[in-house]
């Protein structure tokens, strides 16, 4: 399927089935965008042929995994004909054992979008009525309340996705109008009837990678933004520390031409005004946390295209089992539910993102330390005179940033190497993809906290530098960011609690509020 155009995304309604979904579209749906199921004959015909093939084989007494057999290791158990219709309901019910915190409303919407993207391909044997009800759930903002723990990433996200299946049959809980409600009560309020799942529909809903993929879409967008913000904050730090702009000269990066790395260096170089920004830097070579910033941030920038390809391929794949190929007239039993690609992508992403936290922590350490900050006040305190003795500026913030960095780095152990044999050794090699995705989001949150500390500290540092040496001209990008910060944050002159400012700044980073290249 071709990807939908930018204009289609901006129209406010995202059509499912005619073209491949993008990461940006999944995130737009998470934020509340409306969706519609394609009414094209090609899409509806493809869906119907898959469902018809399933019905034909059932009439012919064909054996189909998860339809006329039990699940997993119980695939050798034949289901009596008169119980086949009940099997999908039992699948949703016995998997209702998720624990941990619940995915929030936004994440639940993304999971629904990711599952729809897979099912609408038309190789899962589901009915149009099922897909339309899932569309209706999104458009009425009736979102399954899904516990985040309980998936080993193969056979896909069985336990968390069972909460979608349960909601479709009128069970468990949903987010609705800002409240947690019983699904059956919301249905009664709207006059909706619960669905009766057709054979294979419970398995089609649950036997896939929608949770890990939905979380990966969010992680990708946050990481991509952080790479740009980190580049801009490096420029702020360089200005504050009177750094050497020659470290980011384009000619230098022609000698080691990783494209993402070169792009990051270009952003920093532009923000510093090129070689005119500080033609006589006090140091021939800055410390690594400035000089090597493009090489650290560049790893993430260079891996992002690969991560996008991996995530979007998974997003737009039929990833349940068995595949019901109505075009070829075949039932194909395999392992497309396995989340190894997303697991590897998220393990890779969290490693690159945690390195940003480490970089920013070191930059902040230089800003507050008079041994390294080239004449700035101790701990970046803006207090003067005799009161300077009792004010401590960003001292504790730097300690906090170091703690958040340490926790982020601790999380970088790849979850995908911790496969566990489960389910009577049928699922004997599993991906841990959903744990990888959750880990990546935790690392992102911690790194965004470090970024909030550095953003406020580097703003204060530039203001102090200009107070010491006069207001030298700043480039347009840096000026725009400094103006934003001036509206949101007062300089720390007298010590005050900074928790609220840090929380607000971290939230604004997640919302991509701050000006970046």
Image: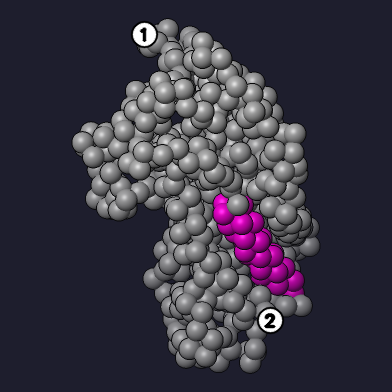
Magenta region: which residues?
A: 341-370
The disc at residue 243 is: none
Q: Quadrant of the C terminus?
A: bottom left
Residue 512 visible in the current orientation: no
Q: Farthest residue in the front direction?
A: 60
- Residue sitting nearer the eye, 503 or 165: 165
Instruction: Quickly name the residue at label 2.
Output: 287
Residue 64 position in % (x across, y down): 51, 30
| Left or right: 437 as drawn, with respect to 471 | right
**Residue at image point 45% right, 19% down:** 197
Element type where label 2 sits in the image: loop
The rendered magenta stretch, by its main secondary structure, is classed as helix
Lower position in the chain sequence, tag 2 or tag 1: 1
Residue 390 position in % (x across, y down): 78, 58
Q: Few, some or many C-alpha atoms within 10 Å of disc 1 (few <14, some 14-19, many ≥20)?
A: few
**Residue at image point 65% right, 52% down:** 443
């Amino acid at each position: 399927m071709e990807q939908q155009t930018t204009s289609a995304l901006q129209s406010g309604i995202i059509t499912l089935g005619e073209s491949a979904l993008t990461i940006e579209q999944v995130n737009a749906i998470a934020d509340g965008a409306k969706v519609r199921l394609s009414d094209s004959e090609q899409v509806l015909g493809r869906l119907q042929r898959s469902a018809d093939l399933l019905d034909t084989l059932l009439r012919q007494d064909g054996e189909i995994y998860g339809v006329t057999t039990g699940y997993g290791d119980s695939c050798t158990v034949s289901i009596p004909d008169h119980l086949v219709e009940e099997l999908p309901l039992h699948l949703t019910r016995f998997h209702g054992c998720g624990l941990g915190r619940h995915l929030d409303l936004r994440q639940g919407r993304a999971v629904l979008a990711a599952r729809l993207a897979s099912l609408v391909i038309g190789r899962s044997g589901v009915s149009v009525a099922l897909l339309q009800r899932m569309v209706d759930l999104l458009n009425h903002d009736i979102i399954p309340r899904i516990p985040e723990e309980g998936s080993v990433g193969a056979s896909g996200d069985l336990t968390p996705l069972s909460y979608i299946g349960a909601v479709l049959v009128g069970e468990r809980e949903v987010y609705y109008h800002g409240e947690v409600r019983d699904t059956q009560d919301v249905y009664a309020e709207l006059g909706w009837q619960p669905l009766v799942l057709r054979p294979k529909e419970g398995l089609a809903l649950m036997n896939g990678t929608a949770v890990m993929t939905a979380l990966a879409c969010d992680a990708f967008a946050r990481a991509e933004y952080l790479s740009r913000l980190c580049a801009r904050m490096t420029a702020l730090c360089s200005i504050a520390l009177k750094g050497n702009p020659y470290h980011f000269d384009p000619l230098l990066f022609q000698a080691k031409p990783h494209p993402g790395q070169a792009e990051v260096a270009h952003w920093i170089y532009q923000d510093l005004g090129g070689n005119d920004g500080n033609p006589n830097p006090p140091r021939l070579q800055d410390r690594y946390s400035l000089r090597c910033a493009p090489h650290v941030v560049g790893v993430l920038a260079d891996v992002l295209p690969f991560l996008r390809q991996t995530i979007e391929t998974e997003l737009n794949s039929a990833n349940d089992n068995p595949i019901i190929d109505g075009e070829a007239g075949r039932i194909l039993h395999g392992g497309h539910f396995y989340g190894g690609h997303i697991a590897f992508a998220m393990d890779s992403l969290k490693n690159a993102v945690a390195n940003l936290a480490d970089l920013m922590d070191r930059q902040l350490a230089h800003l507050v330390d008079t041994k390294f900050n080239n004449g700035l006040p101790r701990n970046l305190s803006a207090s003067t005179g005799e009161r300077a003795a009792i004010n401590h500026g960003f001292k504790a913030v730097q300690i906090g940033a170091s703690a958040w960095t340490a926790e982020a780095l601790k999380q970088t152990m790849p979850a995908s190497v911790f496969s566990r044999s489960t389910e009577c050794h049928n699922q004997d090699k599993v991906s841990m993809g959903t744990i990888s995705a959750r880990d990546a989001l935790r690392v992102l949150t911690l790194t965004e906290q470090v970024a909030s500390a550095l953003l406020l500290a580097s703003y204060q540092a530039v203001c102090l530098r200009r107070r010491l040496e006069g207001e030298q001209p700043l480039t347009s990008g840096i000026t725009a960011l400094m103006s934003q910060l001036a509206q949101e944050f007062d300089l720390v002159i007298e010590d005050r609690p900074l928790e609220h400012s840090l929380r607000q700044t971290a939230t604004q980073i997640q919302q991509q509020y701050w000006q970046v290249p």
